[in-house]
Image: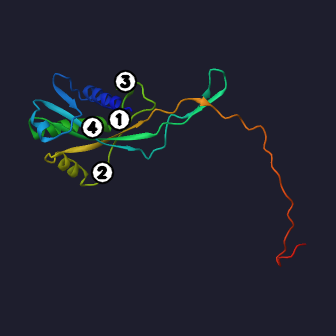
Amino acid sequence: MQIPAVDDGLERFLRAALPLPPDVGDVSFERPTGSWSAQLGRIVVNLFLYGVSRSALPASGGGSRPGPDGRLEVRDGGALVDLHYLVSAWASTVADEHRLLGDVLGRLLTHQTLPPEHLSVPLAADVRLTLSKDEAHRARDLWASLGSPHKASFTLVATVAADPSAWRPAAPPVQRVEGRARAVSAVTETGRRR
Protein backbone atom coordinates (compact mmCIF):
# COMPACT_ATOMS: atom_id res chain seq x y z
CA MET A 1 0.00 0.00 0.00
CA GLN A 2 1.09 3.56 -0.59
CA ILE A 3 0.70 4.85 2.99
CA PRO A 4 4.48 5.08 3.70
CA ALA A 5 5.01 6.90 0.37
CA VAL A 6 2.25 9.41 1.20
CA ASP A 7 3.63 9.92 4.74
CA ASP A 8 7.10 10.55 3.35
CA GLY A 9 5.75 12.89 0.65
CA LEU A 10 3.73 14.92 3.17
CA GLU A 11 6.78 15.29 5.42
CA ARG A 12 9.02 16.40 2.53
CA PHE A 13 6.36 18.83 1.28
CA LEU A 14 5.79 20.43 4.70
CA ARG A 15 9.52 20.71 5.44
CA ALA A 16 10.04 22.51 2.11
CA ALA A 17 6.85 24.62 2.13
CA LEU A 18 6.90 25.94 5.71
CA PRO A 19 10.04 25.71 5.77
CA LEU A 20 10.73 23.38 8.71
CA PRO A 21 14.29 22.05 8.54
CA PRO A 22 15.14 19.05 10.77
CA ASP A 23 17.31 21.18 13.08
CA VAL A 24 14.33 23.49 13.83
CA GLY A 25 11.42 21.09 14.28
CA ASP A 26 9.86 17.76 13.50
CA VAL A 27 7.12 16.36 11.30
CA SER A 28 5.65 13.43 13.16
CA PHE A 29 3.07 10.72 12.47
CA GLU A 30 2.74 9.56 16.08
CA ARG A 31 -0.46 9.06 18.03
CA PRO A 32 -0.74 12.37 19.93
CA THR A 33 -1.29 11.03 23.44
CA GLY A 34 -0.52 12.85 26.66
CA SER A 35 2.63 10.76 27.26
CA TRP A 36 3.86 11.47 23.72
CA SER A 37 3.31 15.22 24.02
CA ALA A 38 5.08 15.30 27.41
CA GLN A 39 8.29 14.16 25.67
CA LEU A 40 8.32 16.98 23.11
CA GLY A 41 11.12 19.50 23.40
CA ARG A 42 10.70 21.48 20.18
CA ILE A 43 8.07 22.42 17.61
CA VAL A 44 6.26 19.57 15.90
CA VAL A 45 3.70 19.28 13.13
CA ASN A 46 1.88 16.02 13.77
CA LEU A 47 -0.16 14.14 11.17
CA PHE A 48 -1.87 11.24 12.94
CA LEU A 49 -3.37 8.72 10.49
CA TYR A 50 -6.61 7.73 12.20
CA GLY A 51 -8.71 6.41 9.33
CA VAL A 52 -8.40 4.60 6.02
CA SER A 53 -11.42 4.10 3.75
CA ARG A 54 -12.30 3.48 0.13
CA SER A 55 -12.94 6.74 -1.67
CA ALA A 56 -16.28 7.48 -3.30
CA LEU A 57 -14.36 8.69 -6.37
CA PRO A 58 -14.06 6.30 -9.34
CA ALA A 59 -10.96 4.15 -9.81
CA SER A 60 -8.05 5.60 -11.78
CA GLY A 61 -5.11 4.36 -13.80
CA GLY A 62 -6.97 1.90 -16.02
CA GLY A 63 -7.10 2.02 -19.77
CA SER A 64 -5.64 0.46 -22.87
CA ARG A 65 -2.36 0.57 -24.80
CA PRO A 66 -0.60 -1.28 -27.60
CA GLY A 67 1.41 -4.19 -26.18
CA PRO A 68 4.98 -5.13 -27.16
CA ASP A 69 3.59 -7.33 -29.95
CA GLY A 70 1.32 -4.55 -31.23
CA ARG A 71 -1.86 -6.12 -29.86
CA LEU A 72 -4.14 -4.13 -27.61
CA GLU A 73 -3.70 -4.57 -23.84
CA VAL A 74 -6.09 -3.40 -21.10
CA ARG A 75 -6.07 -3.08 -17.33
CA ASP A 76 -8.53 -2.10 -14.64
CA GLY A 77 -7.90 1.05 -12.64
CA GLY A 78 -6.79 0.98 -9.03
CA ALA A 79 -9.35 1.79 -6.36
CA LEU A 80 -8.91 5.15 -4.66
CA VAL A 81 -8.29 5.16 -0.92
CA ASP A 82 -8.83 8.08 1.49
CA LEU A 83 -6.23 8.51 4.23
CA HIS A 84 -7.59 10.65 7.10
CA TYR A 85 -4.94 12.55 9.09
CA LEU A 86 -5.60 14.56 12.26
CA VAL A 87 -3.22 17.51 11.79
CA SER A 88 -2.03 19.42 14.86
CA ALA A 89 0.84 21.72 15.82
CA TRP A 90 2.88 21.52 19.01
CA ALA A 91 5.03 24.35 20.37
CA SER A 92 5.95 26.03 23.67
CA THR A 93 3.05 28.52 23.52
CA VAL A 94 -0.50 28.38 22.19
CA ALA A 95 0.21 31.42 20.01
CA ASP A 96 3.15 29.60 18.38
CA GLU A 97 0.98 26.51 17.87
CA HIS A 98 -1.74 28.57 16.20
CA ARG A 99 0.80 30.31 13.97
CA LEU A 100 2.36 26.98 12.96
CA LEU A 101 -1.03 25.33 12.39
CA GLY A 102 -2.12 28.31 10.30
CA ASP A 103 1.05 28.05 8.20
CA VAL A 104 0.45 24.33 7.62
CA LEU A 105 -3.18 24.96 6.72
CA GLY A 106 -2.22 27.74 4.30
CA ARG A 107 0.34 25.57 2.50
CA LEU A 108 -2.09 22.66 2.15
CA LEU A 109 -4.95 24.86 0.93
CA THR A 110 -2.82 26.15 -1.96
CA HIS A 111 -2.19 22.62 -3.28
CA GLN A 112 -4.94 20.33 -4.56
CA THR A 113 -2.39 17.56 -5.03
CA LEU A 114 0.82 16.60 -3.30
CA PRO A 115 3.58 17.89 -5.60
CA PRO A 116 5.17 14.78 -7.18
CA GLU A 117 8.71 16.05 -6.60
CA HIS A 118 8.16 15.39 -2.88
CA LEU A 119 7.34 11.71 -3.42
CA SER A 120 10.21 9.28 -2.95
CA VAL A 121 8.55 6.70 -5.24
CA PRO A 122 6.29 7.18 -8.26
CA LEU A 123 2.62 6.43 -7.61
CA ALA A 124 -0.11 5.32 -10.03
CA ALA A 125 -1.87 8.71 -9.83
CA ASP A 126 -1.59 12.10 -8.13
CA VAL A 127 -2.23 12.23 -4.38
CA ARG A 128 -5.24 14.54 -3.91
CA LEU A 129 -5.30 16.76 -0.83
CA THR A 130 -8.55 18.03 0.71
CA LEU A 131 -9.73 19.22 4.08
CA SER A 132 -12.45 17.07 5.56
CA LYS A 133 -15.85 18.48 6.37
CA ASP A 134 -16.12 16.40 9.54
CA GLU A 135 -19.15 16.74 11.70
CA ALA A 136 -18.76 19.28 14.49
CA HIS A 137 -17.85 16.81 17.24
CA ARG A 138 -15.45 14.56 15.28
CA ALA A 139 -12.24 16.30 16.41
CA ARG A 140 -13.41 16.42 20.02
CA ASP A 141 -14.22 12.70 19.93
CA LEU A 142 -10.81 11.90 18.41
CA TRP A 143 -8.95 13.86 21.06
CA ALA A 144 -11.02 12.22 23.82
CA SER A 145 -10.29 8.74 22.43
CA LEU A 146 -6.56 9.57 22.42
CA GLY A 147 -6.71 10.58 26.09
CA SER A 148 -5.52 14.10 25.28
CA PRO A 149 -7.14 17.47 25.90
CA HIS A 150 -8.88 18.96 22.86
CA LYS A 151 -6.45 20.92 20.70
CA ALA A 152 -6.80 23.09 17.60
CA SER A 153 -6.55 20.74 14.63
CA PHE A 154 -8.04 19.82 11.28
CA THR A 155 -8.50 16.69 9.22
CA LEU A 156 -6.51 16.32 6.01
CA VAL A 157 -7.70 13.71 3.52
CA ALA A 158 -5.04 12.38 1.15
CA THR A 159 -6.63 10.35 -1.66
CA VAL A 160 -4.24 7.86 -3.23
CA ALA A 161 -4.75 5.25 -5.95
CA ALA A 162 -4.05 1.63 -5.18
CA ASP A 163 -1.82 -0.02 -7.75
CA PRO A 164 -3.82 -0.82 -10.90
CA SER A 165 -4.10 -4.41 -12.07
CA ALA A 166 -1.51 -5.87 -14.45
CA TRP A 167 -1.80 -5.33 -18.19
CA ARG A 168 -3.54 -8.21 -20.00
CA PRO A 169 -4.47 -8.90 -23.62
CA ALA A 170 -7.72 -7.26 -24.65
CA ALA A 171 -10.61 -9.48 -25.69
CA PRO A 172 -10.65 -10.05 -29.44
CA PRO A 173 -12.83 -7.59 -31.37
CA VAL A 174 -16.32 -8.67 -32.40
CA GLN A 175 -16.23 -9.88 -36.02
CA ARG A 176 -19.95 -10.33 -36.60
CA VAL A 177 -23.23 -10.58 -34.75
CA GLU A 178 -25.71 -13.32 -35.54
CA GLY A 179 -29.24 -13.72 -34.38
CA ARG A 180 -32.44 -15.58 -35.12
CA ALA A 181 -35.91 -14.26 -35.33
CA ARG A 182 -39.15 -16.18 -35.32
CA ALA A 183 -42.27 -15.00 -37.06
CA VAL A 184 -45.03 -14.00 -34.67
CA SER A 185 -48.56 -13.51 -35.84
CA ALA A 186 -50.17 -10.17 -35.12
CA VAL A 187 -52.89 -10.01 -32.51
CA THR A 188 -55.78 -7.56 -32.92
CA GLU A 189 -57.29 -5.48 -30.15
CA THR A 190 -59.92 -8.13 -29.58
CA GLY A 191 -57.28 -10.75 -29.08
CA ARG A 192 -58.01 -12.62 -32.31
CA ARG A 193 -55.38 -13.53 -34.81
CA ARG A 194 -55.68 -12.03 -38.24
The residue carrying mark 3 is: 117
Mark 1 falls on what kind of element? Answer: loop
**Dot label at residue 134:** 2
Q: CA distance from mark 2 to mark 1?
A: 20 Å
Quarter placement of the C terminus: bottom right
Q: Earlier in the sequence, mark 2 or mark 4?
A: 4
- Left or right for 109, reference 188: left
Amino acid type at image mark 4? Gly
**Residue placed most toward the observer, 149 or 45:** 149
Circles 3 and 2, Cβ within 8 Å, touching? The answer is no
Q: Earlier in the sequence, mark 4 or mark 1?
A: 4
Closer mark to the observer between disc 4 and disc 3: 3
Mark 4 falls on what kind of element? Answer: helix
Quarter placement of the N terminus: top left
The residue carrying mark 1 is: 111
Amino acid type at image mark 2? Asp
Circles 1 and 3, Cβ within 8 Å, touching? The answer is no
Mark 3 falls on what kind of element? Answer: helix
Residue at image x 16%, y 21%? Answer: 23
